[in-house]
Amino acid sequence: MLTREELAALPQGDIRLLDSDIAQDLLTSTELARVAYAAADGTPRVFPMLFHWTGQEVVLSTFVPARKIEALRTRPDVAITIDAAGTPPRALLLRGRAEVTVIDGIVPEYGLALRRYGGAEQAAAQVAAVDVPGVRMARIAVRPTWVGVLDFQARFPGGSTAAEFAQRGQA
């Protein structure tokens, strides 16, 4: 495990940033993941989704025949942000390739995500409502290959320092 000082010194993009307090807080939060991908027509899309962090992958789920399934198979490169509004804001930025697997039934991580977001009772009810014969889901797994963390106290956009960030927009 890296020390706080070692984590603070890592450049944006280093996957070891996943070990930072901010990343871990956001990966276990009830904030939505905002997934950016290229749609079938080539135009960008951003879609908010529940997610489950396995410790190695961000797993998202959708029901077949969602249009994003084929779009992600065709162009699997994605960007994901999980962020918390507030002052100062905190953001986890991820990039990777989506691996899409269609399964018969409910994606296990879908139930785990529902449990984290709404509690055990609500998750069980929601899974029961959709777990019917013939249901098919897509498991969308993204293993981060690039990680960025922003807290606007020690880590700023563009890798700038606090002093540089304070001078933004000034000539």
Image (cartoon, rainbow, N blue to C red):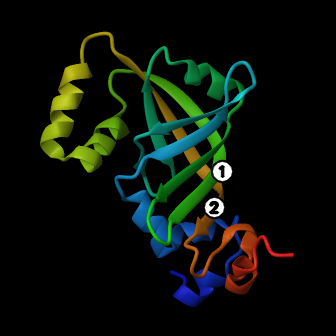
The answer to whether mark 2 and mark 1 are in CB contact below 8 A is yes
Residue type (three-letter) at the residue carrying disc 2:
Val
Tell me the distance, in whole angstroms, between the alpha carbons under discs 2 and 1: 7 Å
Quick check: 4 left or right of 9? left
Specify the farthest residue to the right: 171
Residue 3, can we see it? no
Q: Is residue 7 above or below residue 89?
A: below
Identified at 67% across, 83% down, the residue is 162
Mark 1: secondary structure:
strand
Badge number at residue 147? 2
Specify the farthest residue to the front: 171
> For mark 1, what is the residue?
95
Counting the numbered discs, the total is 2
Quick check: 22 left or right of 148? left
Residue type (three-letter) at the residue carrying disc 1:
Arg
Pick the front one: 85 or 27? 85
Quadrant housing residue 43: top right
Identified at 42% across, 44% down, the residue is 51
Residue 152, image x, y percentages: 58, 74
Residue 161, image x, y percentages: 71, 82
Residue 45, image x, y percentages: 63, 32
